[in-house]
Image (spheres, rainbow, N blue to C red):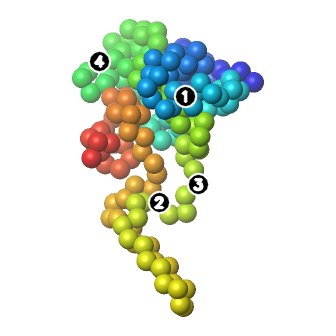
Amino acid sequence: MAIVVEDGTGVTGADAYASLAAVTAYWAARPHDALAATWTAATDANREGAIREAAAFLDSVYGPFYRGRRASYTQGLLWPRNAGLDADGEPIAITDPNGATLPELPPALISASAELAARALTARLAPDLERGGRVKRTSEAVGPLKTEVEYMDGAPAVTTYGPVAGMMAALCDGRQPGGDSAAWWFA
């Protein structure tokens, strides 16, 4: 089943922020990256599934922190938005605060979708976790069979995708998971 791409108009049933052609062009421009080979080797059906997973991941992880307001409750995804400005005061939504129409999605949203789609080809973007966090120390004993795991304080419970986090920073309002400002991604 073909993906339904959001074009910035609030497409009902949209399940992707980027088209197959846009993601393919993104990775064609980055042949030095190992993910480009992963993308090229995949079938179109797998690529489209990965693009859908990328959109779902973006909305579930970053959605509560997107700037502006959802344009319509009939749209398939959380973008387009109304009245959103980035950290520099530039419009990032379908209409700026003065009501002027902006015809497209933010390029950072499409790039983040492309980054995540390639990663989704090799592993789930949001896997089920028993216990999140970074392991600080492990110890094992043979008799009487003892295993101990100590986690670092404040360790994140999920994987953070560095390039994606940076791309999404300007589209979010500073209350992102894990910190009070967009700077948490780069700590």
Q: Earlier in the sequence, mark 3 or mark 1?
A: 1
Specify whether residue 119 is in view: yes
Q: As rendered, which of 32 and 16 lies closer to the eye?
A: 32
Q: As rendered, which of 158 and 61 lies closer to the eye?
A: 158
- The image shows residue 185 at horizontal and vertical percentages of 32, 42
- The image shows residue 46 at horizontal and vertical percentages of 68, 30
Left or right: 172, with 110 as reference point: left
Q: Dot 1, crowdedness within 10 Å: few (<14), some or many (≥20)?
A: some
Q: CA distance from mark 2 to mark 1?
A: 30 Å
Q: Which residue is mark 4?
A: 90
Q: Which residue is mark 3?
A: 128
- The image shows residue 181 at horizontal and vertical percentages of 27, 42
Mark in front: 2 vs 4: 2
Q: CA distance from mark 1 to mark 4?
A: 35 Å
Q: In the rendered view of the protein, which quadrant contains the N terminus?
A: top right
Q: Which residue is mark 1?
A: 37
**In this rendering, is residue 16 above or below 150?**
above
Q: Dot 4, crowdedness within 10 Å: few (<14), some or many (≥20)?
A: few
Q: Which residue is mark 2?
A: 132
Mark in front: 1 vs 4: 1
Q: Earlier in the sequence, mark 2 or mark 4?
A: 4
Which residue is painted at 52% across and 86% down in the image?
142
Q: CA distance from mark 3 to mark 2?
A: 10 Å
